[in-house]
Amino acid sequence: MAGVLALRVVAGLAAAALAALLLEHYGMAGPPSPLPKPRDAQRPHPAPGSGAHNVFWGLQISDIHLSRFQDPGRALDLEKFCSETIDIIQPALVLATGDLTDAKTKEHLGSRQHEVEWQTYQRILKKTRVLEKTKWLDIKGNHDAYNIPSLESITNYYRKYSAVRKDGSFHYVHSTPFGNYSFISVDATQRPGPKRPYNFFGILDEKQMEELISFSKKSSQSNQTIWFGHFTTSTILSPSPGIRTVMSSATAYLCGHLHTLGGLMPVLHTRHFTGTLELEVGDWKDSRRYRIFAFDHDLFSFADVTFDKWPVVLITNPKSLLYSCAKHEPLERLFHSTHIRVLAFSSSPITSVAVKIDGANVGQAAHVSGPIFILKWNPKKYSNGTHTIEVSVQDSAGRSKSVHHIFSAKENTHLKFDPLASYILLTDHYIVARVLFVLIVLTQLAILITFRYLAYPELKEPPGFANMTAFSLHILGKTNIFYYSVLLLTLYTVLGPWFVGEIIDGKLGCCFSFGIFVDGHFLQGGLTFISGIMQLVFFNIPLMAYICWSLLQRCFGYSFRSHLHQGKRWKIISIYLLMLLLYTWQVYSCYFLHVTYGTLAFFLSPLRTWLTLLTPVLIRYVWTLNSTGLGIFMVQLKSHLSS
Ligand SMILES: *[C@@H]1O[C@H](CO)[C@@H](O)[C@H](O)[C@H]1NC(C)=O
Ligand SMILES: *[C@@H]1O[C@H](CO)[C@@H](O)[C@H](O)[C@H]1NC(C)=O
Ligand SMILES: *[C@@H]1O[C@H](CO)[C@@H](O)[C@H](O)[C@H]1NC(C)=O
């Protein structure tokens, strides 16, 4: 009876936890509709033609990670970027989307702000006079917010050394004679800023969301709106109606943070259900990537390119079908356009801009002014289906660059983004982590409690794997010391403080699975849930399995010594190698805690250091438990095996 009751309680808790998670995410009712409707896109004119007006372009650079310890090339190249690249491209504005500095300690595991990294950044901006040449909009990333007790703190060097110097999100309007263009930044860095790694996710509170909604409303007067931020929307925790809904009137959201997963996902682009593009750009840190984007007659286009690789080519008309959105852009202008338009930049004069459509030469584009090249065309010829445009550019230094994409002059078909990229950018990873964490905990608890109260089955079959596993779970569940140890460990992983320490220098805090308390603030858990999952999957559950297995060995009459010398050598060796690996990982996590959150955290960490010390004690107990404790199980096993 008690078992059934306990299971019911567990199931009830599971349902409640899941419901709470879903409610929190989606809200009780649908979102109110505080947001402006997408602007009326039925504007066939002005259509792209032969003129040099109605177009401007900008750059995005992200994850620069200026470091006092690593790769001085980052700073040297940034200086060259701010002088040479900016002089050649002459962007209307530059978006520097966070992680301006690296802010790590010498051994790369810990984190703290280094004033000298910020001074390097500011020195580059000043020396190259880049702020006089273009509008430089720089925002904070999670690295720029490591170990900052409050925005007022002196270590919030962004206030002193950046170009913008003002914390928080902002709305910048780029005004031109042909229209106004809104650029809205999203500052989701945590306040206060814990040390790494627990500031990997961005957090927006209600007030910040209100502010963003008001920016969104104001931006509806602009021709086009771009949002930009450091975090991908999949790594931002935001209250209802959610960050993607708030930016739904944007043509694109430009971000960084994931470093294209270290090159594993070189193209991390997708489209929200609202039509807004989400475009992560590769990092400056290791790959020296940057992005050029343009609005040409209110049609958005962009290219992701590598520093110091010339020529840089961007086809602005006809724009790529993959990145087209009828809801945000006047796409019918493409059909009414009279010219193919290309932006081509190089450090040497451009000598040739050759255009092919569907593999056939259609001619040489002529230079208009600046980087603008045009070629007369008749889009009506391409009104059926999709086509490929290819542009090859050469400069007088003999370098060349060829780019191509699929376009459609009239069709409203959609091309699909890479499903993996969409998964990475569109999944709210903190929700997935929470649900997974809760499910794993509940599964483990359900198993544990079931076998504590479940009566012994009639053992009939010859002892197979499933049978033996079940039997060992019976032993575990019905032996108080092990049952309560495993139960306590799992409950503690969920409820207890993992460690207490200097989450921020000089500010004590407490880390739980569900978030961090520090200096009177609560920071919701994001990465903590992922750590929790790792703890369960790579330690708690294997430990439970090992105890079960050892107890079974005991019941077979083996002692610690004799079980090592039984017949199945390789099986025993592989079990112990695996356990050793997992235990080493646990030991490493104690070291990691020491270097990330300090000595105090190392000593006051029940889930790390204490657990690491207690585990051998528990295992010793398994092997020294006197056989009267196991007697009843041994009798059962014997009678079963002999029958
Ligand atoms: C920008 O919007 C204004 C007002 O709606 C419009 O007159 C103008 O043509 C637009 N600019 C472009 C380049 O479409
Ligand atoms: C841009 O905004 C300014 C100020 O709001 C307004 O006076 C101007 O007409 C706008 N320009 C265009 C082309 O819409
Ligand atoms: C487009 O396709 C339709 C039928 O498939 C055909 O009748 C028409 O001539 C085509 N138009 C052009 C411009 O190719």
Image (cartoon, rainbow, N blue to C red):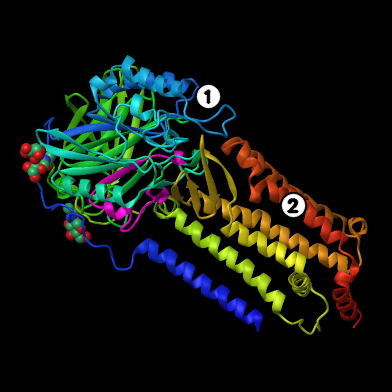
Q: Considering depth in this image, is 92 or 70 the residue closer to the camera?
A: 70
| Residue 47 seen in this snapshot | no
Q: Considering depth in this image, is 180 or 584 the residue closer to the camera?
A: 584
Left or right side of 463 for 101: left
10 Å crowding of disc 2: few (<14), some (14-19), many (20+): few
10 Å crowding of disc 1: few (<14), some (14-19), many (20+): some
Q: In which of the image's four quarters is ligand 2 placed?
A: top left
> Label 1, on which residue?
70
The spot of residue 171 in percent (x, y) is 22, 39
The spot of residue 379 in percent (x, y) is 16, 45
Query: For the point 41% across and 65% down, which residue is it?
Result: 22
Relative height, residue 535 to residue 229 (above, below): below
Spatial CA distance of label 1 from label 2 is 39 Å
Left or right side of 398 for 450: right
> Where, by quadrant of the figure, is residue 230 drawn?
top left
Under mark 2, the amino acid is Leu
From the image, which quarter does the N terminus lie in? bottom right
> Label 2, on which residue?
614
Provide the residue span drawn in magenta. Answer: 233-260
Q: Earlier in the sequence, mark 1 or mark 2?
A: 1
Query: For the point 50% across and 59% down, which residue is it?
Result: 434
| Residue 628 seen in this snapshot | yes
Q: Is mark 2 within 8 Å of ligand 2?
A: no
The spot of residue 52 in percent (x, y) is 13, 30
